[in-house]
Amino acid sequence: MTCRVLKFAKQPYYRWLQDPVSPRDWDDAHLINAAIDVHADDPAFGYRFIADELTEAGFTASERRVWRVCSENEIFSAFVRKRRGKGRLVGPPVRDDLVRREFTASGPDRLWLTDISEHPTGEGKVYLCAVKDVWSNRIVGYSIDSRMTSELAVSALRMAIQRRSPTATTVHSDRGSQFRSRRFQAELDRHGLFGSMGRVGAAGDNAAMESFFALLQKNVLNSRRWATREDLRLAIVTWIERTYHRRRRQRVLGKLTPIEFEAIMTTQAASAA
């Protein structure tokens, strides 16, 4: 009777009744769940990056289909175009600001700063995430990639943890989506580190880290045009490990390099003990 009133044919209705969820709908449901997980892990991802991650996870879906799924379910990148009179939308801080521009530390691995920088090459942009120990100004961890994802920040943090084995260290960053991602926050919690985040649009809240990137920009990034990502990657690593750590003396460290400062201060502390 319902089919007759609504002028529906009976045969399609009974076919639907026997199998209300089509294979396409079933596949879309799994695709939506996977896309939500990818986006939650890294809110910076738009539909193109999500499509790449889904392909890596074993899903077969065109970029157009992923766009449709993301659009219908409001899965958008955290980076939106700037509107007149309004700044870019930035998510809430996952952690409080524990530093409050007091960039000092009484010993090694008490306070780390981290941030991300980018620079173009002939092949596209290169992104660098670095972690700096405020005590000695040493770069204790870094990661370089062609994409600015949460993995970039997590890799730099893991490198710092493997090198230093910190305990109760405060890790201060801005509110970038890479640092607010679940993966980065989980890495902090897993190793007993304290996360800290500055305010939106306040460069001074991470000024000590910005000073390192300014040196890198002047001495490496802007020194020439870089044809390939690999050329720039090698130049960055060489400058950090050879020049910045071992040759560049810093007045704040008593005209010592970060390596010399740590060696001398660690020896003095051991002698005093």
Image (cartoon, rainbow, N blue to C red):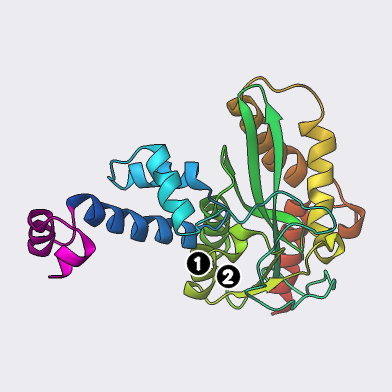
Tag 1 secondary structure: helix
Residue on which the image places disc 1? 182
Tag 2 secondary structure: loop
Q: Nearer the viewer, residue 84 or 159?
A: 84
Residue on which the image places disc 2? 166
Give the mark, 1 or 2, whose residue is nearer the N terminus. 2
Q: Nearer the viewer, residue 79 or 164?
A: 79
- Mark 2: few/some/many CA within 10 Å (<14, 14-19, 20+): some
Camera-side mark, 1 or 2: 1
Principal secondary structure, stretch drawn in magenta: helix
Quarter of the C terminus within the rendering: bottom right
Give the residue drawn at x 73%, y 46%: 245
Residues in magenta, as a range = 1-22
Q: Check disc 2 and give the amino acid type.
A: Pro
Asked if residue 7 lies in the magenta stretch, the reply is: yes
Give the residue drawn at x 23%, y 63%: 6
